[in-house]
Image (tube, rainbow, N blue to C red):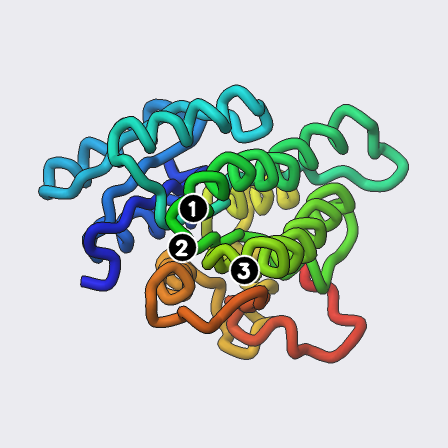
């Protein structure tokens, strides 16, 4: 198994991409700490995976809170004595047009999507540095490079994650710590479906079909489409991969300039 004897923290792990990554990592032998604020879903997933013989625990943590970020890492160290992998996946989306954009929504999105990545990484990196090894996988978004209307805060936060990843790679690389980003395109997660429902008044079918038609692969992705690339970047199969942004988008990013990927 590719992650035997590794300890992984995954934020935003109760649903969607985070849950898919948690399942894949557990199946590959990792001991997994699930972090989220969706307690029911997180506890359910931890119970499901534990019942299958995997070492999986759920911890409630709001990544935008420094005390929660620090406590999360402390709990992982107390339980396992090490942290080998961090997946910064927690994220929120607040669709707001420019005339209606406000500081509260802006701050909320950046606090979770960008500051949360910095905070959890700050405390994980301390532990990884002591062991001179570790892999950080940041889940950004194709919105970091191609975006559309109504998602200014989200796009800005994900572009921030992309450049923050490169900064991590430069500064943490000498300590044996790799940092890479994944840029998912349209992925059928609860976050995506909630946004599709809001945008269409509860009739997301045409919205999703239109999105799929813009993707060269002609489909909207599933969370498992992201878990494989995350496994690659977390494992020793990518030991000389550092600071990249990997688009997992069915080819969306190679569309001609002017395409609106936001739908």
Give the structural element (helix, strand or loop) at label 3.
helix
- Rendered image quadrant of residue 194: top right
The percent position of residue 211, horizontal first and vertical second, equals 59, 63
Q: Which residue is mark 1?
A: 128
Can the viewer see residue 175 in this picture? Answer: yes
Alpha carbon separation for disc pair 1 and 3: 12 Å
Alpha carbon separation for disc pair 2 and 3: 10 Å
Can the viewer see residue 263 in this picture? Answer: no
Residue lying at 46% horizontally and 47% vertically, measured from the top left: 129
> Farthest top residue?
67
At label 1, counting other C-alpha atoms closer than 10 Å, the crowd grade (few under 14, some 14-19, many 20 or more) is many
- Rendered image quadrant of residue 109: top right
Task: Please tell me how many numbered marks the rendered image carries.
Answer: 3
Q: Which residue is mark 3?
A: 174
Q: Relative to 117, does residue 184 appear above or below in the rendering?
A: below
Alpha carbon separation for disc pair 1 and 2: 6 Å
> Label 3 near label 1: C-beta < 8 Å?
no
């Amino acid at each position: 198994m590719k992650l035997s004897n590794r300890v992984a923290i995954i934020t935003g792990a109760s649903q969607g991409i985070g849950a898919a990554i948690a399942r894949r990592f557990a199946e590959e032998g990792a001991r997994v700490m699930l972090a989220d604020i969706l307690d029911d879903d997180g506890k359910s997933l931890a119970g499901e995976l534990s019942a299958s013989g995997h070492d999986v625990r759920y911890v409630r943590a709001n990544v935008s809170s420094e005390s929660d970020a620090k406590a999360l890492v402390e709990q992982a160290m107390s339980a396992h004595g090490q942290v080998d992998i961090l997946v910064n996946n927690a994220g929120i989306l607040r669709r707001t047009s420019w005339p209606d954009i406000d500081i509260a929504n802006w701050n909320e999105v950046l606090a979770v999507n960008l500051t949360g990545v910095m905070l959890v990484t700050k405390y994980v990196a301390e532990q990884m540095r002591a062991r001179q090894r570790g892999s950080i996988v940041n889940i950004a978004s194709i919105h970091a490079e191609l975006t559309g209307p109504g998602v200014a805060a989200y796009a800005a936060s994900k572009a921030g994650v992309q450049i923050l990843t490169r900064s991590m790679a430069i500064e943490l690389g000498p300590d044996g710590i790799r940092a890479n980003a994944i840029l998912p395109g349209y992925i059928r997660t609860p976050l995506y479906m909630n946004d599709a429902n809001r945008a269409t008044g509860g009739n997301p079918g045409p919205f999703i079909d239109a999105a799929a038609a813009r993707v060269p692969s002609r489909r909207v992705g599933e969370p498992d489409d992201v878990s494989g690339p995350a496994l690659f970047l977390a494992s020793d199969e990518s030991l000389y991969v550092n600071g990249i942004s990997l688009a997992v988008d069915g080819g969306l990013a190679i569309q001609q300039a002017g395409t609106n990927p936001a739908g």
